Amino acid sequence: MNKRQEQFLSLYLENRHKDQAAYYRSRHSEYDKARSQAIILSGVLMFLASIVSLLAANDMFGEKWFWAVLGVFFPALSAALTSYSSLYSFEQQSKLYQDASFALHRIEANAVDLNRAADDAEREAKLEAYVTQVEEILRSEQGQWGQLISQLKPLDVPRKPETDNPPEPSKPPEPVDAPGTEKGSDAGP
């Protein structure tokens, strides 16, 4: 391997490949922790809701209304936390970063294999294949964001029917004859 290829490989490996892999590992860890924290906190809130409901039902340790309010508050807070976790897709994002990190780790062996190439042409071809594989993994990770966004469901807003013609004006109601009178007759004195 010539000096230029060695410098490129060294720079690319450290500043692109390993740096991006470290970023993916840290993001995976961050989203995995956030998901775990949301699950644990949601469970704790539901446990507290059950304890508070028991206290409200048995009228223990204070006013019943206070326990009833907390019995409503804790499940609502737990539901809000679960919604927040789902909105930010902690689990899906964690998996996305983990998959990209694993793929980069598998490709790293190809960088070591470059030194075993027989001649410069083979090294150049392996170096090009290695860079292409790494960049494809990075592009693939970026492409996943479009899939993640497409999984979000838009709100269904009812639409008014669009017509080119305005509605016809309604006709006034026809007069109703009073009982005991006939149409066309003069009912005068």
Image (spheres, rainbow, N blue to C red):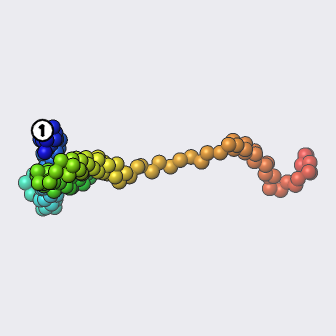
- In the displayed structure image, the side of residue 121 where residue 155 appears, left or right: right
Q: Secondary structure at mark 1?
A: helix
Q: Quadrant of the N terminus?
A: top left
Residue at 15% across, 47% down: 21
Name the residue carrying label 1: 3
Residue that appears at 21% across and 49% down: 121
- In the picture, measured across the screen, residue 91 lies left or right of residue 150, that is left
Of residue 134 and residue 102, the one placed in the foreground of this image is: 134
**Coordinates of residue 49 in the picture (x, y in percent):** 16, 57
In this view of the protein, which residue sits in the foreground, 122 or 170? 122
User: x, y (%) of residue 152?
Assistant: 35, 51
**Amino acid type for the residue under numbered disc 1:** Lys
Residue 70 position, x and y percent, is 17, 51
**Between residues 65 and 26, which one lies in front from this camera angle?**
26
Circle 1 residues within 10 Å: few <14, some 14–19, many ≥20:
few
Residue 117, position in %: x, y? Answer: 14, 53
